[in-house]
Amino acid sequence: MKGDRNGTGESQDAGIGSRYAAQRSMIFSSGPIAAIMLAGKTGAGKSSLIKLLGGRDAEGNEPVSDGGLESCTKKTTTYITKHNGRTVLLLDTPGFDDSAVDNLVILNDIVSNLYMWALQDKDVHTHGVLFLHDISETRFGGSQQKTLQLLKSMCGPEAMGNVIIGTTMWFDKGAKYESQVKRESEFLMKYWEGIHKTVRVPEGDEEVANAIIGDLLARPPTKLLVQTELLRPPHTCEATTVGRIAIPEGKREAERLAKEMEEQKEEFVRIEKEKEREREKERQEEHRRYLEEQERNRKEMVEEQERNRREIEERLMEEQKKNAKEQKEREEAQQKHLKELEQKQKKEMEDRLKEEQKKNAKEQKEREEAQQKHLKELEQKQKKEMEDRLKEEQKKNAKEQKEREEAQRKKLEELAEKQRKEMEEYAEKQRKKMEDFEREQEKERKRVEKERADAIRRKEEEIAEIQRKADEAVKNAQNESSGWWCSIM
Ligand SMILES: Nc1nc2c(ncn2[C@@H]2O[C@H](COP(=O)(O)OP(=O)(O)OP(=O)(O)O)[C@@H](O)[C@H]2O)c(=O)[nH]1
Ligand SMILES: [Mg+2]
């Protein structure tokens, strides 16, 4: 709406535009049509009434009404119906509530529809507003008052003559009905002035519903204040009376909500931190308890083990004592039994031994006799065999001896022959050697003789020389002594 400066509505957003175009093609085929807005708190019965009047949306769907606490109609929707052959647009609106932000959204939604009607002034004639009020509500609460305020500022004093208040949720009779009647007059006097009329609207009463529509259609078409304001520049909701009330409130509330959200967020973070600290503390405490528990358990376990150990030891000792006693008894019994057994066995053995001895002695005797006999036979046999074998052996040995001697003799002869030959060869060799030796001896002897002769000759020569020298010396000495002797003389 903000950008719609030419007042034609062409620049409305594509969603609204296409929706409107669809509606238009259906609606305007039968000339100008009447438009009525239904308003009121959530659950007042707006959608039910439109359904009762046969209203259908552009897709042919009837409105959805619900008895839940939650608001059923979330978006402003135009429904089309016929009244005495005339096409009527019924604008189903969501109920205002205590939230200014939500109200701003709802208002924007409603206002955009009203603006479209105003733009189609020639085709769409606004015939008024049917405001439904739940008369069973005992209090005229905040959202009721807000709804009233917004509706009044939307309609403006002039259009209030085209507003019908329809009261719903009537009880049939009784005290509750009476109190509803009382509330109805109070409510009318206190809050509404200048309206066309009030009507009681029993649930599902088609006649009353149609009568209301007929009544509004009979009124001259009007323009709600907000429509008039929107047709003037700047064509914005902010510039309308209702917008000036709702928008700052919405903004304030939005800011308040944002602030609240921020505070809540901070509070949440603080609480979370606090919780985390507490959780940490609890965890630590839990951990400490767990450790203590563990320690306790461990101690208990150790004690339990100690107890068990002692118990087992005691039981073991008792068991051992018992076993020792039983063992002793058993041993004594065994000893006794063994003794008896031994005596019995001894006696049996003795008896058996005696019998055995008797039997053995007899058998022994028999065996000895048989053995004697057998030995004798064996001896004789062996003796004979020995003699035969000896004879044979002697024969054999004599033969073998003879053969051996013969062989030895032959061997000796061969050996002697061989030795003789060897001796001869050896003697021959020795003889040759001797001859060689003698030849060598001869040679040596000759050489030695020669050497000796040479030596003798050399010696003789030496002796001759020495003789000669001695002679010469003697001669010299004689010569000298004769001279000396002569001198002495
Ligand atoms: N007892 C009783 N119930 C009614 C009357 N009118 C409507 N109802 C029931 O009230 C419930 C709510 O009705 P709706 O038509 O959905 O109310 P609304 O005003 O459209 O509600 P929102 O869409 O939430 O704004 C439904 O179950 C209706 O059947 C009435 O006059 N008396
Ligand atoms: Mg509804």
Image (cartoon, rainbow, N blue to C red):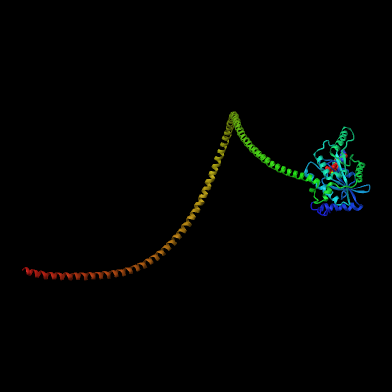
Residue 360's x, y, as percent? 57, 35
Q: Can residue 356 be seen in this view?
A: yes
Front residue (pair 121, 20): 121
Q: Can residue 106 be seen in this view?
A: no
Residue 220's x, y, as percent? 90, 46
Q: In this view, does 108 lie to the left or right of 26?
A: left
In this rendering, the answer to whether 45 lies above or below 9 is above
Q: Is residue 454 left or right of residue 32?
A: left
Q: In this view, does 39 lie to the left or right of 461?
A: right
Residue 25's x, y, as percent? 88, 53
In this rendering, the answer to whether 212 lies above or below 174 is below
Residue 394's x, y, as percent? 49, 52
**Which quarter of the rendering shows the C terminus?**
bottom left
Front residue (pair 294, 30): 30
Which image quadrant shows ligand 1? Answer: top right
In this rendering, the answer to whether 239 lies above or below 406 is above
In this rendering, the answer to whether 437 lies above or below 248 is below
Q: Is residue 368 left or right of residue 103?
A: left
**Image point (85%, 50%), residue name:** 118
Direction right: furthest residue: 84
Direction left: furthest residue: 489
How many tags in the picture?
0
Q: In which quarter of the image is residue 467?
A: bottom left
